[in-house]
Amino acid sequence: MVSISWNFLIVYTLTVLVATITPGPSMLLALTHGVRYGVRRALASALGNTVASVLQALVAVAGLGVVLAASEDLFRVVRYAGAAYLVYVGICMLRAPAVPLNAAAAASGVMDGEADAGAPGVPGAADASDADGGPGARKLFAQAFFVAAGNPKAIVFFTALFPQFLAPGDTLARSALLVADLAVIAFLGMMLYAVAGSRIAALLATTRAARWYNRTVGVAFIGSGAGLALSDR
């Protein structure tokens, strides 16, 4: 039985919640996936982000985050790799066709609905491909995973966070509870942005609007990548 006070858990949850829902590359990606592919498809994105966040938290709990924080070379390698991936995502957005995004999201939703109903010749959501109007769940999962995992500052943040809520004598179950709480918040935070994206898709019903959206988001990702590469710790 894990012994933990409600006040303790509430403070921890609020701290993680604020850090999670603060706009950043992962949340921008969730918003974009919600706009382009709808909420159903964005579930894969939320799972990808959550898995990356949990792995980063486990690294911090295991104490390896201290090694990353202390090693300039290792930190720089992870940071540059993450920055390069963000720039790559931004370039892909800039080169994306200017398809009215509400139509694309609606088409993805229709295809998912047909797949769930077992329509012949329609692949399931997990195996959906670019042929049905958008990338499959695996691709969305991977994209969200690498965007989140490419930010070494998250591990440094968790390394600073967990000592505030864990003591040397704490049980493994207590650590697992905090990581599970983090996983739930990360998933819900991504889905919140995805839902918001699906709601604003109707505003992007023209080719012109879609083109400007792609440009804006693409530049934002490239800017995030440049900022991550150039920033100090």
Image: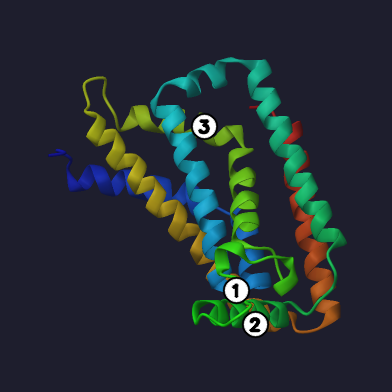
Where residue 28 appears, as percent x and y from the top left, is 64, 58
Q: Mark 2 — residue?
A: 106
Q: Say whether marks 2 and 3 touch (CB < 8 Å).
A: no
Q: Secondary structure at mark 3?
A: helix
Where residue 12 appears, as percent x and y from the top left, is 33, 43
Q: Amino acid at mark 1?
A: Gly
Q: Is residue 186 visible?
A: yes
- Identify the colour scheme used: rainbow
Numbered circle sitting on residue 155: 3
Foreground mark, 2 or 3, reads 2
Q: Mark 1 — residue?
A: 38
Crowding at dot 2, Cα within 10 Å, few <14 / some 14-19 / many 20+, comes out as: some
Please say if 147 is above or below 137.
Answer: above
Numbered circle sitting on residue 70: none
Q: Secondary structure at mark 1?
A: helix
Q: 99 and 22: which one is in front?
A: 99
Please say if 70 is above or below 47.
Answer: above
Q: CA distance from mark 2 to mark 1?
A: 7 Å
Q: Amino acid at mark 3?
A: Ile
99 to the left or right of 111 = right
Where residue 132 appears, as percent x and y from the top left, is 70, 74
Q: Is residue 231 visible?
A: no
Crowding at dot 3, Cα within 10 Å, few <14 / some 14-19 / many 20+, comes out as: many
186 to the left or right of 142 = left
Q: Say whether marks 2 and 1 touch (CB < 8 Å).
A: yes
Crowding at dot 1, Cα within 10 Å, few <14 / some 14-19 / many 20+, comes out as: many
Q: Quadrant of residue 94?
A: bottom right
Where residue 228 appears, as percent x and y from the top left, is 71, 37
Q: Residue at x 26, y 45 (%)?
A: 9
Q: Residue at x 76, y 32 (%)?
A: 230
Q: Amino acid at mark 2?
A: Ala
